[in-house]
Amino acid sequence: MTFKEKVQRFLKELQDGGTARPLGDVRQREPMSRHTTMKAGGEADLLVVPGDVEELRRTVLAAHRAGLPLIVLGGSNVIVQDGGITGVVVKLSRLNRIRLIGPDRIEAEAGVLLPRLARAAARAGLSGLEFAIGIPGTVGGSIVMNAGTREGELAPRIDSVTLMRPDGEVVTLQRNTLRFRYRHAELPQGCVVSARFALELAPAVEIEATMTRMLGARTATQPLHSPSAGCVFKNPPGDSAGRLIEAAGLKGYRIGDAQVSERHANFIINRGHARTNDILSLIRHVGREVARQFGVTLELEVKIVGRAARPKGAPRPSRLRVRPHASSTHATGSS
Ligand code: EPU
């Protein structure tokens, strides 16, 4: 099958694969700069925003049958290359329900933003997710990378994780079967659909006061008002990537519109229209300088996805725009 045929097959599968209800939000050649906190990156061949778990299942199965790769992206902690993403990008922003379960458990779907979950837990008098107040990621992405701050990480609070396997089957994994490390979770293949968190009862005012304090500290030390992907590098054992990058004299260093933040050196901010190429050149430069000056190899915390941009003058790949299949799809503007 040519790529164009695969896309047609995918769109047809989406329509035929389910009930009469059409799957609403499918976009072609969608700029990922609209869907990443870094506000950079090329186009996804297809972007789907499923309205519920059943639509997610239809999307996963349709991609599988059409032979198209599928990736779920929350948009934070990720850098999309200028050449865009081959296949299907799934955005779970509409899987956004939060539910209290019993006295000390809270359940959230994968697309819920962590600060919203932290606030919901606080209102219910549940403590343990305060640290998440300043993390701009989704529940799904934050589980996959065991997101955290110096004040805590997600892993100890996870009670169970519900995943959709590539064949569409939904499985729930209990805490004791999961392995987590610093910024990493070992999960079977599939995408996180929801998770339950085990918390502790505490007065809501105390939880809220702690969150206000943490958010204040974060705002004072991090460039939260500029587009970025969060911390670029993991902290090396016993040290801080930000401290090393500042000591290397790189605060404010700029390539194109990509700049090492003046406020926190482990952030690269987009000063306007940064190309991913510039961001990646800057990351490489920072890594090389820190290695040269201090002998420390920094490891990336952000994930880089997609294809590199075509070299200048190279012919465009024949990924022609395909008309959406009948009424099952519609193209929309920005998210
Ligand atoms: N520092 C500098 N210069 C800088 C930045 C930091 O000298 O430009 C120094 C600070 O003065 C401090 C030390 O480095 O002595 C640590 O800095 P900070 O407290 O800001 O914490 P961090 O280790 O840089 C970690 C997480 C952040 C999280 C903060 C706050 C990682 C890689 N980073 O940063 O997470 O928000 O703690 O808890 O684990 C992220 O994951 O995206 C992220 C930003």
Image (tube, rainbow, N blue to C red):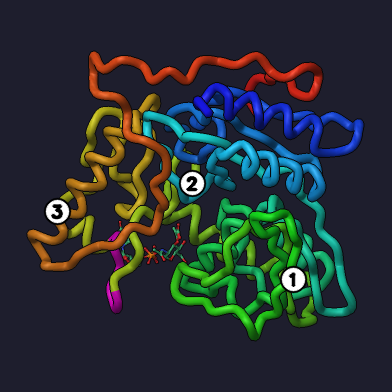
Q: Residues within 10 Å of mark 3 (few under 14, many from 20)?
A: some
> Amino acid type of disc 2?
Leu
| Circle nearer the N terminus (3, 2) | 2
Question: Left or right: where does residue 334 sit relative to residue 291?
Answer: right
Q: Give the residue at mark 2.
A: 224
Instruction: From the top left corner, tell me how far across and down residue 99 is, in percent.
Output: 85, 62
Q: Position of residue 50 (x, y in %)?
A: 74, 40
Query: Which of pointers 1 and 2 indicates the residue nearer the eye?
Result: 1
- 314 over 121 or under it: above or below: above
Q: Which mark is residue 172?
A: 1
* Res 270 → quadrant: top left
Q: Is residue 332 placed above or below 141 in the rendered structure?
A: above
Amino acid under disc 1: Thr
Q: Mark 1 and mark 2: span between their CA atoms?
A: 34 Å
List x then y, in percent, for residue 126.
Answer: 77, 74
Visible in this render: residue 318? yes
Identify which residue, 101 or 130, lies in the foreground: 101
Pointer 3: what residue? 288
Amino acid type of disc 3? Arg
State yes or no: Cβ of the residue under disc 1 lies below 8 Å from any atom of ligand 1. no
Q: What are the residue bounds of the magenta stretch?
A: 237-242
How many numbered badges does the structure rendering display?
3
Please give the label number shown on residue 222.
none
Of labels 1 and 2, earlier in sequence is: 1
